[in-house]
Amino acid sequence: MNGGFWRSAGLIALRDLRVELRSGEALTVVFPFAVVASWIAPLATNASPLLLRDLAAPVYWLITLLFGMMIVLRQTALETRAQRRALALTGLDPAARFAGRAGASGLVLAAVAGTLIVPVIIFYDYRPPSGGALMAPVIILASAGLAMLGTLAGDVTIGLRARTSLAPLLMAPLAVPLLMGAAQSLESLVAGKSIITWVLVLVIADLGLAAAGVMSARALEEISL
Amino acid sequence: MHPVKGCACRGPTRFSGSAAIPIHSKRVSRPPSIRPSSSSPPLVDLVDLSVSLGGSPVLSNCRLTLRPGESLGVAGPNGAGKSTLLGVVATFIAPTGGSGTVLGAPLAGPRIPAVRAGIGWSGHLPALYPDLTLGENLALSARLTGHPASRGQLVLEQVGLGGAAGIRAERCSNGMLRRADLARLLIGSPRLVLLDEPDAGLDRDAAPIIDHLIATTTRRDGAVLCVSHDAAKLSGWVDRVVEMRDGRIT
């Protein structure tokens, strides 16, 4: 991976971020509904504050996964065959395309996930632990993993009739290690325990997804043309 | 300066009609020195090539050779297999029978990704991103192919869209999108240019853009393959025209 690779990845990421910014879908559609979804559990269960606090981390990550899937899968769903073909003929390394797309999705997802903490604090009476700053790398690692997984799932299902239902179904079970790592990291932070084990789980999952994405990029591009 | 005809954008948007490509100009004829030579290795060479899609044969035993400096038209009715043929030559569709090379690389072989940057292709639908402006779309193509972003603006001016660079693609008329898509092919210097019904959606004033693209490509020893349902139009653009029917080149 030379400078040209990262330059190309950066151009693709910039394109996707620009498209996202112009459409405003993550900010004006996905985020408000994610906030409403986070409100449903305390509203429906009328649970005790203690129980809500216990539920806060898993519910937060579940909502991040469900609504994050919309953000991540949207980009591949919007791309037309003509656009993919024209991109391939620029000589763009498909692995750079994967890195750029996942990078842009990961940034948007991390921003949404980071902001979603606010309603969780309000609705679940969640008290961020004293080492709350450590939540940032956990959110970034989990968002990067979900973005890579979504980009892969989107590319694998390109051209399939059942793609709108198949891509999330493919993504959800494979996201389990990421969700476990992220939710358990936050739980450990609250309990004042070390989070290193769960952060390692996230790092290993991210590295595995990055390797899978880079190695499968060429083959998936050929299928998508 | 004249207003954009049929532009879907709001407001009195104007763009420069004084394109670098002379409007109403006669077709540029190539000097004899760059006429296709039978000794040059072909840029496209298809031998008994067949393609089946979903179990149905779309192309059967197609033979086609395209040498440097040559432009070829393939005419035929809808469903004849013209776009599939173009897809094969563009390396998008792998053949299911026969063999062939494009820019020296065997089709569906490992060298194909390396030669893709030498191919320029304009399909039925413009390959532009609707949320980006025309300028951003062309700048992206320019930068991805190793050119400065300003090259995008330059080619937009060449196709008469210099003043429309700031308009989002989703707000442009079909004709503007087609012009911008053809401008994409002017960014680099592809050795092989593939055009699928290039004049679809274009007004008569835009016809010289196609002429210019074909002439500049063949002049630098490239080749052009153009498909259309209209043989008469094709014969005005390219050196020779072959007909295609039921997946066969006749």
Image: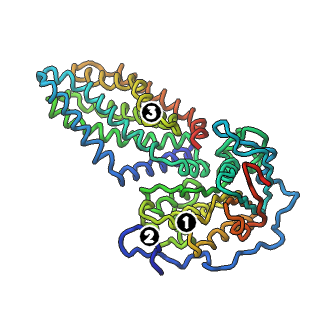
Mark pair 1, 2: CA separation: 12 Å
On the same chain, marks 1 and 3? The answer is no
Asked if marks 1 and 2 fall on the same chain, the answer is yes
Write down the chain letter for disc 1: B
Mark 1 in CB contact with mark 3 (< 8 angstroms) = no
Subunit under mark 2:
B
Q: Quadrant of residue B207?
A: bottom right
Quadrant of the image containing the C terminus of chain A: top right
Q: Which mark is residue B38?
A: none
Distance from disc 1 to disc 3, alpha carbons, whole Å, reads 35 Å
Instruction: Say whether disc 1 or disc 2 marks the residue closer to the N-terminus.
Output: 2
- The residue closer to the viewer here, A134 or B184, is B184
Q: Which residue is mark 1?
A: B201
Classify mark 2: helix, strand or loop: loop
Quadrant in which the N terminus of chain A is drawn: top right
**Label 3 packing within 10 angstroms: few (<14), some (14-19), many (20+):** many
The x, y position of residue A134, in whole percent, is: 28, 30
Image location (x, y in percent) of residue B128? 50, 56
Q: Residues within 10 Å of mark 2 (few under 14, many from 20)?
A: some
At label 2, which amino acid type do we have? Cys
Q: Which residue is mark 2?
A: B7
Q: Which residue is mark 3?
A: A167
Which residue occupies 72% across, 75% down? B28
Chain letter of the residue carrying label 3: A
Circle 3 sits in a helix, a strand or a loop, which is it?
helix
Work out whether residue A60 or residue A173 is closer to the camera in this orientation and state it: A173
